[in-house]
Image (cartoon, grey):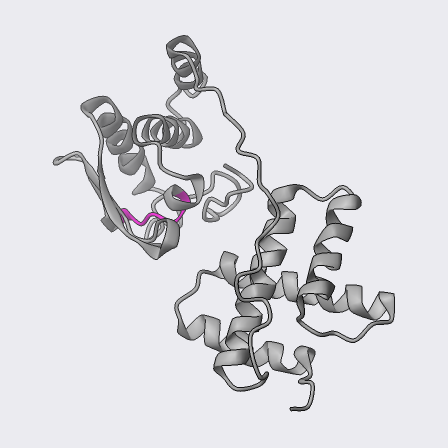
Amino acid sequence: MATPDLTVLLASWSVHLQAEGRSAGTLESYLTGVRLFLRHCEAAGIPAVLDRRTVNEFVAGMLAAGAAPATARARHMALRRYSAWLADEGEIGRDELLGLKPPRLDVKVVPRLSEDECRALVKACTGKEFVDRRDEALVRFLLETATRAGEVIAMGTADVDVVRGVAAIRRGKGGKGRVVPFGPHTGRAIDRYMRLRRAHRRAVEPALWLGGGGPGVRLSRAES
């Protein structure tokens, strides 16, 4: 079987990932990983082939250059997914990366905030302006529910019920949704924010969290 052009087939893989419902972040991570591998092969003057030796050398080079283990692991995963898809589609004879172990990832223990630190964080958001109300609601919700930043930023106005004290996370890790409860203090903070939100210039938008600058841009992870 002839060696496939991995660059050309990347577009077809992108279509496949979108059809699978992969998130924009996952899609970008996978495609970036493959593109970096292809650049590595071109710079090294070697064929762009998804075999164990070439992939291991690529990952080892990343780590030697100072890349974080988590980043190297993500690139490794992208190449494994691409190789599996190529084999399933009949573009390569077999998936040579099947069972290839990823780089070891040390699990970092992140210390929890103390009660005093949590109170100080909430106090820092005290105020009656739009941004103050929004930030207090965000901080209280994050502290109480332990949801991920990306999950919270993606919430819509229809996802929160302050009367019942529950919120729907439509797309969590692995694409799974869930319902998270919150207490009356968080509910009050969200209610105060949503009342101010009604007067926002972009109040008709479905996004729950709106930016405080300019004409009302949706809150982004960078701003959060």
Q: Residue at x 31, y 50 (%)?
A: 156
**Residue 59, x across and y down, in percent:** 70, 54
> Is 38 colored magenta in this rendering?
no
- Give the quarter of the figure containing the N terminus: bottom right
Q: Main secondary structure of the magenta part?
A: loop
**Residue 217, x across and y down, in percent:** 48, 48
Tell which of 49 and 124 is nearer to you: 49
Q: Work out whether 76 lies above or below 92.
A: above
Tell which of 180 and 133 is nearer to you: 180
**Residue 74, x across and y down, in percent:** 58, 53
**Residue 120, x across and y down, in percent:** 43, 12
Splitting the image into 4 quarters, where does residue 136 fall? top left
Splitting the image into 4 quarters, where does residue 57 fall? bottom right
Q: How many discs mark residues in the rendered view?
A: 0
Q: Residue at x 61, y 57 (%)?
A: 76
Q: Work out whether 169 lies above or below 16.
A: above
Q: Is residue 4 left or right of residue 127?
A: right
Q: Is residue 214 left or right of residue 56?
A: left
Q: Residue at x 36, y 26 (%)?
A: 143
Q: Work out whether 30 lies above or below 140.
A: below
Tell which of 88 and 21 is nearer to you: 88
The residue stretch that appears in magenta: 153-157
Tell which of 135 and 195 is nearer to you: 135
Residue lying furthest left in this view? 164
> Is 155 colored magenta in this rendering?
yes
Splitting the image into 4 quarters, where does residue 196 fall? top left
